Structure formats: structure tokens, C-alpha cells
Image (spheres, grey):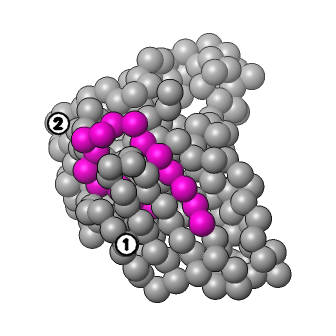
């Protein structure tokens, strides 16, 4: 079992819709959670971090964390074609210590 | 405003050849990392350096060696390249080990390495 699981997609949503990206993790004592966006052929870029249960909003992005269910999600409201990218979930803490453990990523396609 | 610079950007090797991937950062970060990224596998940590003078193995270190030459530079060496090492390699750096939300890991643009 992979430590951080994501559906590889592609997840296809129409422009203006809400995109919902999900991630589960296996190490119950993980402490910090991150979402990276990676455009094709480019490097990952941090877009959200979340440390405690609940929601964290930043512009059109909302990260949601449920430690009891070992689940973290990213919502993108009013999706734009420029949001089309691969979104990587990363988890820090627990057995990996200070290192980040990445999921395989979900490819999002926003259609005009 | 370079950030993290990796060289080369592309490389094709034959099985058994050796090469060194170079990485330099100009953000005065203490920690540096080498990852590989394969389709559907996300980023996997090869080696990291918590600070100048120290290096440690990550998740997939076999077949690689690293050198933290100074605070700016962290190189990755393939001594005898194998087709299984065909991948995209990313170097990253952060102020603190692992990076945190307001001081995350910053990534270079990657090196695309093919081994025939």
C-alpha cells in the first residue's frame, strides 16, 4: 500500500465548475499536508498547506483535512483552463520525519 | 532571480556510463534534496542534505551518490547508469529540513534523463 494515495485521473471539469481533488494517507501520525501544482514539463509549485483539521481557504482554493479519516482534499472553485495541471498531495511527519512523502498526483483538465 | 538551477536539462546516456547532475541554489537555504519522478509515482526522495557537510539516504538511494559541495551546491552522481534510472530528476532546497508552509521546498526545473 502506497503511503499517500491519489486517483491519477484525468479529472475533467467544465470551466467555472468546482474541481475536487482527494488524497488519503496511511501514516496516522502525519502532521503537515501540502498541495503542489505541476504544469506539464515544469517543476512542482506549492499552492496550499494545512496543519489542523477543518478547512483552509486561499482565494479560489480550499484545502480540507480530516485526520481521523486520514483524508485531505483540495477544492478549486470557478475552475479555469489555466488550472489544468497535475496536483500532487504531500505529507510530512510521522515515520518520514521531516521529509515529504508525495502521492502520484491527479491530472486535472478544465475544459472551456 | 534564479532560485534553484539544474544542469543539464536533458541527457541521454548508454547503460554503464556515468554522469553527474548539478544543482545550485542562490537562496541561502540550508537543506537540499534530490528527487526522481516517474509516471504515476509522484516524487520520490533519493538523497537529501540537511545542512552543509551532511547527506542522508532517502527512499530510493540505490545506484546514486551525492556530494554537498558547499552551501549552494548539491550534486547527484550515477556511477553506472541503468535503464531503470530513466526518469526526471528534480533538485529542491528549503530553509529548514523538509520545508514548512511559509518556507517550502523550492524546486529546480528538472533534468530529463534517458538511459538506453
Q: Is residue B3 left or right of residue A73?
A: left
Residue range (magenta): A20-35
Query: Which image quarter: residue B57?
Result: top left
The image position of residue B107, as x and y in percent, is 44, 56
Mark sitting on residue A77: none
Query: Which image quarter: residue A20?
Result: bottom right
| Chain of the residue on which disc 1 is drawn | A
Reading the image, the residue beneath label 1 is A55
**Relative vertical location of residue B111 with respect to residue B65 in this rendering, above or below:** below
Q: Are marks 1 and 2 on the same chain?
A: no
Q: Is residue B55 left or right of residue A73?
A: left
Residue beneath the point at 55% across and 15% down: B80
Residue beneath the point at 44% across and 25% down: B60
Judged from the image, the secondary structure of the residue bearing numbered disc 1 is strand
Mark 2 is surrounded, within 10 Å at the Cα level, by few (under 14), some (14 to 19) or many (20 or more) other residues, namely few
| The stretch drawn in magenta includes residue A30 | yes
Q: Which one is nearer the viewer's eye here, A44 or A53?
A: A53
The image position of residue B47, as x and y in percent, is 36, 32
The image position of residue B96, as x and y in percent, is 20, 54
Reading the image, the residue beneath label 2 is B53
Amino acid at each position: 500500500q502506497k503511503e499517500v494515495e491519489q486517483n491519477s485521473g484525468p479529472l475533467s471539469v467544465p470551466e467555472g465548475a468546482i474541481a475536487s481533488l482527494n488524497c488519503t494517507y496511511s501514516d496516522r501520525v502525519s502532521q503537515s499536508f501540502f498541495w503542489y501544482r505541476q504544469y506539464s514539463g515544469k517543476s512542482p509549485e506549492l499552492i496550499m498547506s494545512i496543519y489542523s483539521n477543518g478547512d483552509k481557504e486561499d482565494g479560489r482554493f480550499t484545502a480540507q483535512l480530516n485526520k481521523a479519516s486520514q483524508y485531505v482534499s483540495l477544492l478549486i472553485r470557478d475552475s479555469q483552463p489555466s488550472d489544468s495541471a497535475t496536483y500532487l498531495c504531500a505529507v510530512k511527519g510521522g515515520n518520514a520525519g521531516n521529509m515529504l512523502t508525495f502521492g502520484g498526483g491527479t491530472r486535472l483538465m478544465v475544459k472551456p | 532571480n534564479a532560485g534553484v538551477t539544474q544542469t543539464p536539462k536533458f541527457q541521454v546516456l548508454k547503460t554503464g556510463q556515468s554522469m553527474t547532475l548539478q544543482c545550485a541554489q542562490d537562496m541561502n537555504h540550508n537543506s537540499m534534496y534530490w528527487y526522481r519522478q516517474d509516471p504515476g509515482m509522484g516524487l520520490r526522495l533519493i538523497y537529501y542534505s540537511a545542512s552543509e557537510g551532511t547527506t542522508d539516504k532517502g527512499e530510493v538511494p540505490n545506484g546514486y551518490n551525492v556530494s554537498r559541495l558547499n552551501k549552494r551546491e548539491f550534486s547527484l552522481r550515477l556511477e553506472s547508469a541503468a535503464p531503470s534510472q530513466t526518469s526526471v530528476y528534480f533538485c529542491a532546497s528549503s530553509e529548514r529540513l523538509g520545508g514548512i508552509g511559509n518556507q517550502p521546498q523550492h524546486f529546480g526545473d528538472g533534468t530529463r534523463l534517458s538511459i538506453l
